[in-house]
Image: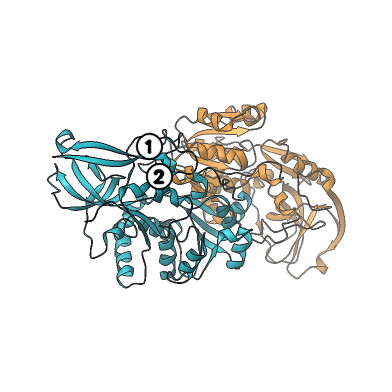
Chain colours: A cyan, B orange
Amino acid sequence: MELTNRTIVTRNYIDGAPKESDFEVRSRVVSLSREPAGSVIVRSLYVSIDPYQLTRMKSDSSSQSYSSLATGIAPGEEVDCYGVGKVVASGDPEFEEGDLVGGLLAWGEYCVLKPGAMFRKLDPMGFPLSHHVGALAFSGLTAYAGLFEVGKAKKGEKVFVSAASGSVGHLVGQFAKLHGCYVVGSAGSKAKVELLKGKLGFDDAFNYKEEADIKATLRKHFPHGIDVYFDSVGGEMLEAAVANMNLFGRVAACGAISEYTGSGRKAAPDMVEVIYRRIQIQGFLCPDFLSVHSDFISATCDHLRSEKMVSVEDISTGLESIPSSFAGLFHGSNIGKTIVQIAVE
Amino acid sequence: MELTNRTIVTRNYIDGAPKESDFEVRSRVVSLSREPAGSVIVRSLYVSIDPYQLTRMKSDSSSQSYSSLATGIAPGEEVDCYGVGKVVASGDPEFEEGDLVGGLLAWGEYCVLKPGAMFRKLDPMGFPLSHHVGALAFSGLTAYAGLFEVGKAKKGEKVFVSAASGSVGHLVGQFAKLHGCYVVGSAGSKAKVELLKGKLGFDDAFNYKEEADIKATLRKHFPHGIDVYFDSVGGEMLEAAVANMNLFGRVAACGAISEYTGSGRKAAPDMVEVIYRRIQIQGFLCPDFLSVHSDFISATCDHLRSEKMVSVEDISTGLESIPSSFAGLFHGSNIGKTIVQIAVE
């Protein structure tokens, strides 16, 4: 069987904020018979659009090899990403046509998963498939592991979440509330702040774009200090959070979106405060926490079923919407998890 | 019994590098009968001179209350510091005249230790008293706890130590070598570098003042990356170390001398690298690690007795030498632990 596969690839390295014109559609004919034995061809249904991908598209990213999530992507190369799809042709006896799978797919209508690729059969468990790209996938695990394993949030502690209406942040805040923490989020628009304080049940939230002095804003919101800061932003926000942290406070850092485009200033948290207050700043990636994956899935399914937790999703339709969805992340146009639906199940 | 006590106090807040003229001698008559019941008067023999004291002398330090090590010192107030002394008058039945004690004394000929003060009887165990202000006191515990408890250095790992000929750094490097690590230190003069590579047995060392690009220098010294960075410096050195760290690398940060005087730039470690490489930056103070104190003392005494470890001390004599010894720390004039001998035993 031969298929024409259309993918979204970069036209060039991207060193600033991404624009739609940095991307193009590439068509290529794929055939299982020309792939290594045991390969599987999957039709993409939903794919995840994540800010960290930008760090892989920079001109200096080719030497990165810390993690499969970090390897550089040269212009024209396939952009692998988390997604959910359906098997259309299988050379692997474990999979057959029609199986739903979740794992590392790509920004394309199809992808060829070679032996050893990171994917598994997917049981939707009664949830929309899009949840399996967000709340029940890497975004959810990042929120859960970052808050509990890295940030070690305890009941009654004060938690600050930046990019709080984003794919990970909106789940972090809800996990923290359900755990008995006091939670304040920052976001970049009035509508996002209202979502946080309303539907998502944050104790409080603020629009950072309306605050001239984030350090002072955090002091007002946390008169007794911050115990855990869940950082997806870096830059000035990280500095301000550190300045307001309690003794033995923890920063769980999984993203630094303000630093990805090179336009924001790099975080220079006050090291004297870090030392005297014994603050921990810990970078992490969720694949390091697969050991808590089953706990995470079980807790999250319970919360979603009982409607104590909401998965907010920002879904665009069609392969061609990937570049604008991705570029939009850096203008804060998304609310919740950014997903592109490539095809209907 | 009445005594005239001469102390070294600050004349003003100090917001830049300290100068001798920022200090003065103050005389005051003390008498045990006018102190709270249970107080003890101690004659200082050796007192510790430490860079962190500068952070307590700044105009904005009065609100600090993270730790007794961090409380602000207003002009004219006594400067408490680690020291060794001899009891001259005691209202506490646990202590009698002539007892040697170690603990928080002060920059003065005498100090009055009120009930609850942090000090204890001292058994010199055959070592010079000055060792009980440095290698066997807070400097040693900082080195030991920072390297093993915070940095979690393992045999075979690669350790970078800044301010490596300083009070803490020269012990860190020796502990690390004795533990089977590969150790490189940075220091600020040719003589210091020679001391590190020679007498102290570091695998390698460099003079940071002769290096235009510390990041590149570290890349050369650590072609396989840094696992543990023991940071007493902050600023550019911290950035360069983070840029050269391995996956899951640890920064044990106990000082930021380059940032204390406000002249150096604040560290802005690349958060994208911190995240992808899952780096931990942990501030710490040694009093949090009293649980390992007896292990530390036993290991350090063994190393010193077997001459596998050397305690390098930079001892000046007389109360009046405190201001110049302290100011000298910020010009790198000291080698090893800076101590002032106030009186002969």
Q: Is residue A163 above or below residue B186?
A: below
Residue B152 locus on image (x, y percent): 47, 46
| Residue at horizontal 35 percent and vertical 35 percent from the top | A76
Quarter of the image holding residue B327? top right
Q: Quadrant of the C terminus of chain A?
A: bottom left
Q: How far apart are the two marked residues, 1 and 2, measured between alpha carbons? A: 9 Å
* Side of A75 relative to A266 (left or right): left
Q: How many marks?
A: 2
State the residue in front, A246 or A195: A195
SS at mark 1 in the image = loop
Residue A20: percent from left, percent from top: 42, 44
Image mark for residue B170: none
Label of residue A73 in the image: 1
Residue type pointed to by label 1: Ile
Front one among B329 and A175: A175
Would residue A322 be seen by someone viewing this image from the given angle?
A: yes
In the rendered structure, are the residues bearing label 1 and label 2 in contact, judged by CB atoms less than 8 Å apart?
yes
Q: Position of residue B64 (x, y in %)?
A: 68, 60
Do discs 1 and 2 share a chain?
yes
Tell me which numbered mark, 1 or 2, is placed earlier along the sequence. 2
Is A335 left, or right, of A115 in this rendering? right
Position of the N terminus of chain A, as image quadrant, is top left
| Badge 2: chain ID | A
Please tell me which residue is depicted at 75% across the width and 71% down the height of the picture.
Answer: B37
Which residue position is annotated with label 2? A53
